[in-house]
Image (spheres, coloured by chain):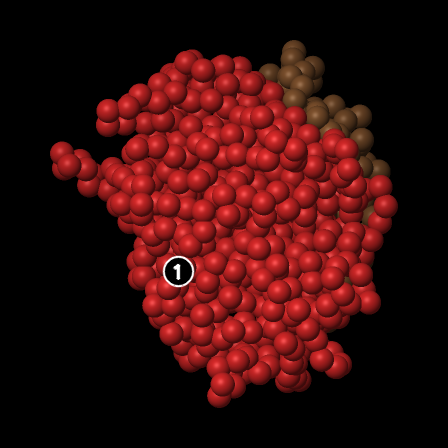
Chain colours: A red, B brown
Amino acid sequence: MPQGSYDAIIIGAGPVGVNIAKVLTDRGKRVLLLEAGRASGLSYDGWLSYVDTYRSAVMKEPNAPYPPNPNAPSTYAQDVLNIQHKIPILSGYQVEKGPLSFASTYLRSLGGTSLHWLGTCPRMVPNDFRLKTVYGVGVDWPITYDDLQPYYCKAEWALGVSANKDEQGHFGIWFPPDYDYPMERIPPSYSDGVYAEGARKARVRFGDHDYGMTVTSLPQARNSIPRQNYALSSAYGTAHVGERCEGNASCIPICPVQAKYSALRTLGQMDKNFYTLVTQAVASRLIVNENGRIGGVEYKRYESEGSNQYQTGTATATLYIVAAHAVESAKLLLASGAANSSDQVGRNLADHPFFLTWALNPTPVGAFRGPGQTSEIPSFRDGPFRSDFAAFRIDLGNWGWDIATFPPNSNVYEAAAANTFGKTLRRSLGQQIPRQLRVGYVIEQLPEPGNRVTISAEFVDPIGCFRPVIHYNVSDYTRKAMIAANKVSDALFHAMGIPDADIYTKFTPDSPGYMTYKQDDGTVVPLSFFGSGHHMGTHRMGVSRTDSVTNRYSRSWDHENLYVVGCGGMPTTGSSNPTLTAVAMALMAADDMLTQLG
Amino acid sequence: MAGSRRIPRAPSEEARQRFVSFSVLLTGYDSAELWGTGMVDAYLGFLINAVGDQVTGALLAKWTTVVEAAGPDSSALDQLVRDEILADPTLGPVARNLIVMWYLGEWQQLPADWRELHGTHAADQTCFVSPEAYAQGLVWNAIGAHPQGAKMPGYGSWALPPTIPEELP
């Protein structure tokens, strides 16, 4: 149990919490890191046991390597896929009240969701911070791209992002002239080149504008060739493993060599003299003093995952930092009756609905090789259409049809069921699967008060903490973007020489996230989406205490010694995977914390 | 009786040879390639645990019969396998499971009506035979790739032109 007084208590040992801890401990501050989940990854052979769990998992979804922990439960994809199309979904950990199931999952563990993330790290574009002013939708952030820019640089070095900056100047993204990413871009895949050939020729029209497409490398937190001054980190607890991406092609859900960043890496860079890590300790309540300051955090420490017995403890510090993930942080604030004079805690929950299209290329593209994505088409991250429908980022998948149809397993099951065997079977698998192409559209979703995380005494976990109760829908602004995305997809596939007969995109009522959109002419368009694994908006920052939870430094308007930091702080989402932005926001908050601590 | 598993009799050499020759036909890979996975004994052992000695014996005996009947005629052999094994209500589901087990490393729980007729075994659960079995799945070779999360091919390998699965005669 932790002893003594701390400068800061950080709740949540994921990428946000651990990066804040590093900034504070580097300056000699004493930090207590409380983590609800288990101490995953503190030994390399322990890490390999999770790799084995993944290899044995029948359903290889994002949390598959990490066994269920009843005392700090996480949601598994099968809990929220909603195959039965029944709302509410009461099984699993997060309760889904609908009308649509929030399709993304996260992980409660040391390292947090950075254990299973893909590692994609694009910056947001300048207009993402000014949606209201520029396009008349959503809200503006209290900061601009220019404000966050120096922290993006720091975050890219903290996470170890590989990219070439001369390719990354999309829609006004800029870098200081003397700045470079710590590592060279991850080599584009062979199939990226196949897409690029077609993208060159593809055109699509929205409103009064014609759009072309380019293929550019995706910045990602994945070890590649370091530039000067950057010291590579290998896997936690062992030397020489993971100093380059080795092409395991299992980034989601686990990198066997830890070439992909996880918060373990930052933990390994910290001075143990300045922090105490306590795992299997679930923060259950923030204690609010009469003067409005946070006076302590109550937590439940369970000795064993196999028993719901726990001890309650209280820890105190000068500053309290809630960095438990957008859903968990909101849940803790609601459970504590803290930080919510704005009534925005838990509200404005957003994902990036992930819309897929898939096809067969005329020739093999080498599916199932390399990181999940190495390149993107950034061409729709911004544009005049945003006053009408959402922006999207286009991910070019490297793993065949991936979650659209679950190859190669589905191919083998179907073939066996049809009594296909021998060389015929072997040949047919080799004929189709290497040609599989899957494109993913990462689509913005506007903040809506009705999309929210709530708590209810009806839904508690075995140690008496609340389960998150989620209400979620996808508005027309995003549904129209899916229709636009499908148009982009057709233009791209056709330009690649793929006829309609080889485009296999199909949405039926059995598809995940099935929904429809009624167009102006009355036609009803079927749509389907997955979760991107992004949870944002639930404790947004703003300029006013009336409609936001924190100020620009992620500091609570209501409690001056409380910070609530993470993707939950994002007022709008753009189409960029949010972890890089959240870590940049966290580093900005950490500077403010140092000022407070003096 | 949790934890006490009946230790199966080690399969006879004859059973192993029949199992491998049947697997060669089912998978389209030759016996050296199958032995090279290291999974022959693991899969045969799993099969015996999942369906029992009798069904395993019946399957391998039927295979021996059709091999003898077909002689050197490989298309006759294929047809006999279809008619006598894959179409057989007892042997067919098991043979199809062997295809999936070799290609993915995964055993599929047998259909409900099969289990009703023949009884269930505790080991008949949908699962991977082992983490190594996952990594030895033949499908990855068939598609010119490698099992995700295993047999990592190295930095930059994904930039190279794809390995076209070998042309099969």
Q: Is residue B1 something that shows in the picture?
A: yes
Q: Residues within 10 Å of mark 1 (few under 14, many from 20)?
A: some
- Asked which quadrant contains residue A381, the reply is top left
The kind of residue tagged 1 is Val
Residue A93 screen position, x and y as percent: 50, 66
According to the image, label 1 marks what residue?
A: A543
Percent position (x, y) of residue B23? 69, 31
| Callout 1: chain | A
Work out whether A519 lies above or below B112. above
Instruction: Report the residue at 54% width, 30% height from top.
Output: A168
A588 sits left or right of A239 in the view: left
Q: Report the label total.
A: 1
- Quarter of the rendering containing residue B138: top right
What is the x, y in percent for residue A458?
41, 78
Q: Residue at x 68, y 54 (%)?
A: A263
Q: Is residue A441 visible?
A: no
Q: Is residue A450 above or below residue A198?
A: below
The x and y percentages for residue A150 are 58, 45
Considering depth in this image, is B142 or A158 the residue closer to the camera? A158
Q: Nearer the viewer, residue A176 or A384?
A: A176
**Residue at 78%, 44% in the rendered image:** A233
Give whichever of A4, A240 is nearer the camera. A4
Q: Residue at x 43, y 66 (%)?
A: A549
Of residues A394 and A161, the one nearer the viewer is A161
Residue sticking out furthest to the left? A521
**Quadrant of the snapshot with the N terminus of chain A:** bottom right
Which quarter of the picture shows residue B68? top right
